[in-house]
Amino acid sequence: MGDRMRRFSPLIAPWLFLVWLLLWRSVEPIVLVSGVLVTAAVLLLFPFSPVRSPLLLRPHRLLGLVLYLVWDLVSSGVRVGWDAARYGSRAKAVIIEVPILVDRDFLVASSANLVSLAPGTFVLHIDRPQRCYYVYALAGKAPDPDVVLRSSMQMQVRVVKAFGTAEEIRSAVERAEGFGAEPSRAGEDA
């Protein structure tokens, strides 16, 4: 029993119970009891494997990532709106293969999600064996693949600098430089 209890974080049960209450939008006794039973059943039937991945947090880098993300959202929204108004259905798109700079799933998924968050870009597929992901980017009359590649790699570097280890940061910056991205624009070294 002790082994099974260590397979999930103590914070998961309250979150599952809270989600149950929010789904039912009620705190009636039957909802409370069924929520406890469903939470227990989920945790017993579907044990989570422990996460053995370090999650470092650098507040100043995280703040820089958030500010850059806000800037990216606003500027991308304006650019996509302008392209839609100017080119309409004649707007072009491009799909670019972007190399993955780090191996940790959390960093890869976070980078891909932040790239997809900006209007006009979307990560279509993450190919872990080939260490790349494919980004669909909407651009005006003539999309520039190098701009999409650089901005996607810079986002990866920013995410790694906010959450990665010193070794992951060094590796990501070196790989980005090797692919011609400009990591100095993504912030200073850690």
Image (cartoon, rainbow, N blue to C red):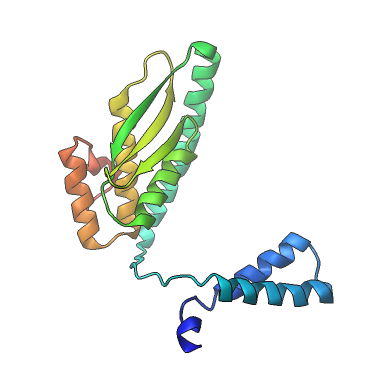
Residue sitting farthest toward the bottom: 2
Residue 120 percent across, percent down from the top left: 47, 29
Up the image or down, 113 lies above or below 82; here it is below
Residue 90 percent across, percent down from the top left: 49, 11
Up the image or down, 106 lies above or below 81; here it is below
Query: Total of numbered circles in the picture?
Result: 0
Residue at the image point whose x is 30% and y is 37% from the top = 98
Residue at the image point whose x is 38% and y is 33% from the top = 135
Residue sitting farthest toward the front: 45
Question: Of residues 189 and 179, which is closer to you in this image?
Answer: 179
Residue 78 percent across, percent down from the top left: 51, 27
Answer with the quarter of the image where residue 15 lies.
Answer: bottom right
Question: Of residues 140 and 101, which is closer to you in this image?
Answer: 101
Question: Of residues 188 and 51, which is closer to you in this image?
Answer: 51
Left or right: 176 as drawn, with respect to 115 = left
The answer to whether one can see residue 82 in this image is: yes
Residue at the image point whose x is 40% and y is 50% from the top = 109
The answer to whether one can see residue 190 in this image is: no
Left or right: 142 as drawn, with respect to 74 = left
Left or right: 24 as drawn, with respect to 78 = right
Residue at the image point whose x is 51% and y is 72% from the top = 47
Left or right: 88 as drawn, with respect to 145 = right
Rendered-image quadrant of the C terminus: bottom left
Residue 130 percent across, percent down from the top left: 27, 42
